[in-house]
Amino acid sequence: MQLLHHLLFPILLLTGASAASARRACSKAIFVLSGDSTTAPGGGWGDSFNATTLLPPSFGENHAVGGRSTQSVLANGEWAAVLDAVEDYKAQGNVYVTIQFGHNDQKIANFTAQFEVNLRRMVNDVKAAGGVPVLVTPLARRTWSGGVLTDLLGDWAAIALSVAAETGTHKIELLKESMRYLAAIGEANARTFDLAAGDKTHLNAVGAVVFSRLVSDLLGAELGEPVRCVTNRNETLSAAIRDGVMAT
């Protein structure tokens, strides 16, 4: 309970007139999250990102849906809703669209070429709508073999990074950094993030806070002050993630 209380209620400490002035100078930002169940409500990091890291009047909308691949999210109309949100909010400030897929794309045989095509389309769609796309590599699965954390999503992360480089698009390496942290804390500690016993993919409330903090920190590092100044600080948790230790 102490860990949950600590993670769910980070305290933002601002000292001095310069810090207060910097906050007042921030431009409002809107985050539109697109992805699969590892971003979606009920098992992903997205709702926690919106609730625990964003400072009003900035806000986020979680459009991620469990079970979706890049192909199904384009086919089922959910991607159109993401673009509609960009159109609706772009007059209010920068609209950042995070795009995180791979967990379900990897289940489809011979799908890697289509994954690349779909990501490229999504990036171009967001830019055309007036938003800022951010390609997010997949969240690591918490799967160990012989005492070693197994990389099950590296091929899909590599495609996302390749599309980012090709299109000049912002990206964050969530797979690499989540694997680094999970490997550092070990399997027993990583199991405390499971949504249910034996679920090596989805996150409970504590896991969602930990990995939404990681996403927030990575976005700040990639996008700079326009994002850092609209996101909350939790220096204790950020340091724990950075140093590869469990927060207490």
Image (cartoon, grey):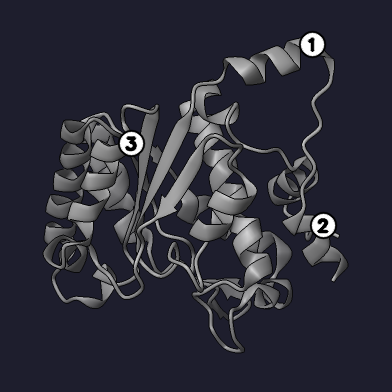
Is 181 left, or right, of 32 in this rendering? right
Amino acid carrying label 2: it is His
Q: Looking at the image, is mark 3 or mark 1 earlier in the sequence?
A: 1
Q: Is residue 68 above or below residue 7?
A: below
Is 7 left, or right, of 218 in this rendering? right
Q: Residue, x 29% and y 45% (percent of image)?
A: 85
Mark drawn on residue 17: 1
Amino acid carrying label 1: it is Ala
Task: Tell which tag, 3 or 2, sits nearer the viewer.
Answer: 3
Q: Label 2: which residue?
A: 6
Residue 17 location (% of width, % of height):
79, 11
Mark drawn on residue 89: 3
Q: Is residue 191 above or below residue 46?
A: below
Mark 3 and mark 2: span between their CA atoms?
Answer: 33 Å
Mark 3 and mark 1: span between their CA atoms?
Answer: 31 Å
- Asked whether disc 1 touches disc 2, contact meaning CB atoms under 8 Å apart, the reply is no
Q: Looking at the image, is mark 3 or mark 2 earlier in the sequence?
A: 2
Mark 2: which secondary structure?
helix
Mark 3: which secondary structure?
helix
Q: Residue, x 43% and y 38% (percent of image)?
A: 30
Mark 1 and mark 2: span between their CA atoms?
Answer: 27 Å
Crowding near the residue tagged with mark 3, few <14, some 14–19, many ≥20 C-alpha atoms within 10 Å: some
**In terms of depth relative to the viewer, which is nearer, 14 or 116?**
14
Image quadrant where residue 180 sits: bottom right
Q: Looking at the image, is mark 1 or mark 2 earlier in the sequence?
A: 2
Mark 1: which secondary structure?
helix
Amino acid carrying label 3: it is Tyr
Crowding near the residue tagged with mark 1, few <14, some 14–19, many ≥20 C-alpha atoms within 10 Å: few
